[in-house]
Each structure stands twice: as structure tokens, then as C-alpha cells.
């Protein structure tokens, strides 16, 4: 998928804004919720997670648009972009669940009787004290884990592998080079285990494949351009 086509779908920045707006809505709901409900979630927990979320967004520029956007940075790494969006969507879904409980729209699982629910989820979610966790505490834990996942992706975001280009280069057949490259690797590293020699040889062949793709890509996009620009440059 090209960068232009990706822009037809909601951008990462849009998902970041949706997540931030939902955080604010839940914090507002927490302020006016009855103490019997609001006490089921650590008082500073939600604000702390919003702070972590803002730190992540600021570090990778997830809130930016245009050529400074994360969409643009990940234009050749759609697998990372899709993972980021999946995590951001999860943040919104979990926050919506929390808001529904705080607003009284629905009751949390720990307040349901056996006749209200077919499952006893609260018994399967034990807190550090050994007592069942409240659903709000479990949702907060889910948000924290999701933001941690976003932070762990930061290194991949800063140095994204050109995943899309490798996928597009697969139409170039370099299988006939593999035996030569494996043999070459064996000669260069005669005391290396055979499986590593094969892996190195195939990696060299894949590199040949990618470089050929880049060459064809440059020639294809250069078609129709004048050999010299006007003005004698």
C-alpha cells in the first residue's frame, strides 16, 4: 500500500487525537462519578497513563501530520504502522469501557450476581493483594500494557525496515544465485556450521534481489524525465 493510499484511511495522528480525547472524557467522568465507583480505580493511575501516552507521542511525533508524521515515517513499513494503529484502537476501546462504568451506563463485573452473568471473571483476575481486581483496575492495567507496547515499538519506529519494498521485490527471481552465494559463504567461512552458511548465502541472494528492485524502481520512476534540466543544470 502506498503512502498516498494510506492517507485515505484515518491517520495515526487522528487515532492519537481520538485516544487523547477519550482520555480526557474518562478523566472528566472520573471526577463526577460516585465515590463508590471512582474508588475502584487508583486515583492517579489514569492521569499517569495519559502522561506516558503523551511522552510516547512526543518522542515519535505520532501527533504530527504531513511529512513529519508517523504515517510518512512508516510509509515503507506498513507492518509497524498497522501495529501502532491496532494498539491505539485498543486504547480507545478500553477507555470507552471504563467510561461506560464511570457514567453508570453499565455495571462492572464485580457488581454482577451469578444470575446477571454467566461468567465469574472477577474470580479469574486477582490483584496483588490476593483479592479479585475490580473491572476498572483491570481496564487500567490493560491501558498501561498497551502504552508499554507502544513504547517498545519506538526503536522500530525510529529505524523502520523497508518491509514494503522487500515484499514488492519478490517478483524478481534470484533463486539461481542461491547455490553460488551459499558456496561463496562456505568458502569465506569454512569452519561455520552448514545451516549458518546456508542462511548467509540466502541472505546475500535476498540482498541482490532487493538491490535489483531498487535499480528497477529508480529507472521506472525516472522514465519521462528530461536527461538535462532547463537552464543548463
Image (spheres, grey):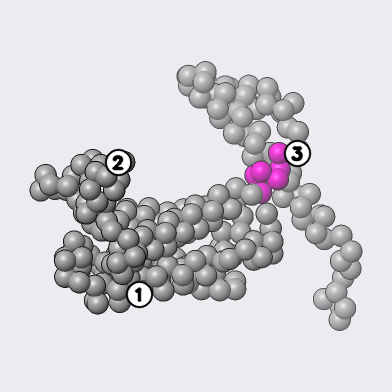
Residue at the spot of label 2: 119
The spot of residue 3 in percent (x, y) is 66, 62
Work out which residue is located at the far bottom of the displayed protein and give it.
231
Residue drawn at the location 64% of the way across and 49% of the way down: 164
Q: Is residue 74 left or right of residue 138?
A: right
Q: Is residue 164 above or below residue 54?
A: above
Tell which tag, 2 or 3, sits nearer the viewer: 2
Instruction: Give, as a single range, the part of the protein colored magenta.
Output: 165-170
Lower position in the chain sequence, tag 1 or tag 3: 1
| Prevailing SS of the magenta stretch | helix
Dot 1: element: helix
Compute the Cα span from label 1 to label 3.
48 Å
Dot 2: element: loop
Numbered-mark total: 3
| Residue 167 drawn in magenta | yes
Residue drawn at the location 55% of the way across and 27% of the way down: 199
The spot of residue 43 in percent (x, y) is 18, 68
Amino acid at each position: 500500500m502506498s503512502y498516498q493510499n494510506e492517507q485515505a484511511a484515518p491517520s495515526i495522528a487522528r487515532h492519537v487525537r481520538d485516544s487523547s480525547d477519550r482520555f480526557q472524557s474518562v478523566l472528566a467522568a472520573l471526577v463526577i462519578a460516585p465515590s463508590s465507583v471512582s474508588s475502584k480505580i487508583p486515583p492517579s493511575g489514569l492521569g499517569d497513563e495519559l502522561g506516558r501516552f503523551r511522552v510516547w507521542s512526543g518522542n515519535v511525533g505520532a501527533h504530527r501530520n504531513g511529512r513529519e508524521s508517523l504515517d510518512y515515517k512508516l510509509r515503507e513499513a506498513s507492518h509497524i504502522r498497522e501495529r501502532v494503529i491496532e494498539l491505539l484502537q485498543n486504547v480507545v476501546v478500553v477507555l470507552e469501557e471504563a467510561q461506560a462504568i464511570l457514567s453508570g451506563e453499565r455495571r462492572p463485573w464485580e457488581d454482577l450476581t451469578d444470575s446477571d452473568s454467566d461468567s465469574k471473571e472477577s474470580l479469574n483476575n486477582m490483584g496483588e493483594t490476593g483479592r479479585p481486581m475490580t473491572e476498572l483496575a483491570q481496564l487500567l492495567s490493560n491501558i498501561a500494557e498497551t502504552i508499554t507496547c507502544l513504547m517498545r515499538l519506538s526503536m522500530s519506529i525510529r529505524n523502520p525496515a523497508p518491509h514494503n519494498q522487500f515484499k514488492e521485490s519478490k517478483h524478481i527471481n534470484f533463486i539461481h544465485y542461491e547455490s553460488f552465494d551459499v558456496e561463496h559463504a562456505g568458502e569465506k567461512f569454512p569452519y561455520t556450521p552448514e545451516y549458518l552458511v546456508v542462511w548467509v548465502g540466502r541472505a546475500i541472494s535476498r540482498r541482490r534481489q532487493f538491490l535489483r528492485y531498487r535499480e528497477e524502481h529508480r529507472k521506472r520512476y525516472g522514465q519521462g524525465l528530461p536527461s538535462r534540466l532547463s537552464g543548463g543544470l
